[in-house]
Image: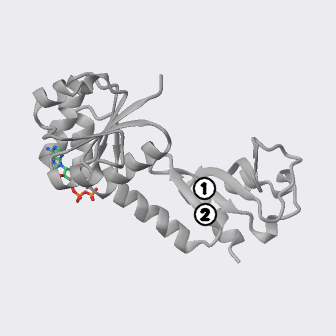
Amino acid sequence: MQKQFVIIGIGRFGSSLARTLTNMGYDVLAIDSNVERVQNFTSEVTHVVEADATEPETLKALGIGNFDVAVVAIGDCIQASILVTVLLKDLGVKKVVAKAINDLHGRVLEKVGADKVVYPERDMGIRIAHQLISTNVLDQIELSSDFSVQEVLAPPKLIDKTLKELDLRPRFGVSVMAIKRGGEILVNPGADDTVKARDVLVVLGSNVELARFEEEYHE
Ligand code: ATP
């Protein structure tokens, strides 16, 4: 059966998440205590309910324990976000993802049982900064605070060379995991594969190594 999602809090982050999952064909239940927000959201997702998610009985009545994934998208009211995270884990939700507005908030969410803590504002700042300093970096996913995967538009100096000739792993500690070419994707390219113009390289490395790689080929 398809995964079912419950999103608690439909501010800018929660509503965008709920809308995207719905557009991807998933069943989404959105909960918010603000009546106006709920009314404006009725046509956007499968179900939307006006409720205070800090009330255990309400969550039980809504059958929240049966959901595969719950996202606590309450940011500013730290107390409510922590309470709701605890309640969701108590009710047996397998995966609880919680939004934190700062490091301390995030640490508390982890301590009370959140399976994953996200920092949308901080992460978006990092992504945009990388895109701004390098015209070649199209996207970046942080794997940890030290390691990332980046999508890099193949710099001119790499074009028409094989991966063996480029020797990126020994020189920079950067691994090419895939090459996107037009609509195709070449996964796990080999030493004899050649980089072509307009290729997008999916590279993995430490942030320091990736920055060195970017600088070397920055035009
Ligand atoms: P964002 O930064 O995502 O735009 P926001 O600033 O609009 O968020 P937040 O205070 O972070 O608002 O809260 C997000 C949503 O969570 C709001 O729509 C708010 O009504 C809802 N919310 C807050 N507390 C509760 C609660 N106890 N139960 C249900 N919904 C809640």
Instruction: Point out residue 99 in the picture as x, y percentages from the top left corner.
Output: 29, 47
- Camera-side residue of 137 and 212: 137
Q: Are marks 1 and 2 in contact (CB under 8 Å)?
A: yes
Q: Quadrant of the C terminus?
A: bottom right
Vertical side of 131 occupied by 177: above or below: above
- The residue most toward the bottom is 219
SS at mark 1? strand
Instruction: Point out residue 92 in the picture as x, y percentages from the top left corner.
Output: 27, 21
- Camera-side residue of 134 and 12: 12
Label 1 residue near ligand 1, CB within 8 Å: no
Numbered marks: total: 2
- Count residues near mark 2 (Cα–Cα under 10 Å), then give few for <14, some for 14-19, many for 20+: some
| Residue at the image point whose x is 22% and y is 54% from the top | 37
The answer to whether residue 75 shows anywhere in this view is no
| Residue at the image point whose x is 81% and y is 57% from the top | 166
Instruction: Point out residue 160 in the picture as x, y percentages from the top left corner.
Output: 88, 62
Vertical side of 137 occupied by 187: above or below: above
- Residue 103's label in the rendered image is none
Q: Is residue 24 left or right of residue 55?
A: right
SS at mark 2? strand
Provide the residue designation for mark 1: 150
Give the color scheme: rainbow, by chain, secondary structure or one colour. Answer: one colour
Can you tell which of label 1 and label 2 is closer to the viewer?
Answer: 2
Q: Is residue 86 left or right of residue 200?
A: left
Q: Quadrant of residue 189?
A: top right
Provide the residue designation for mark 2: 138
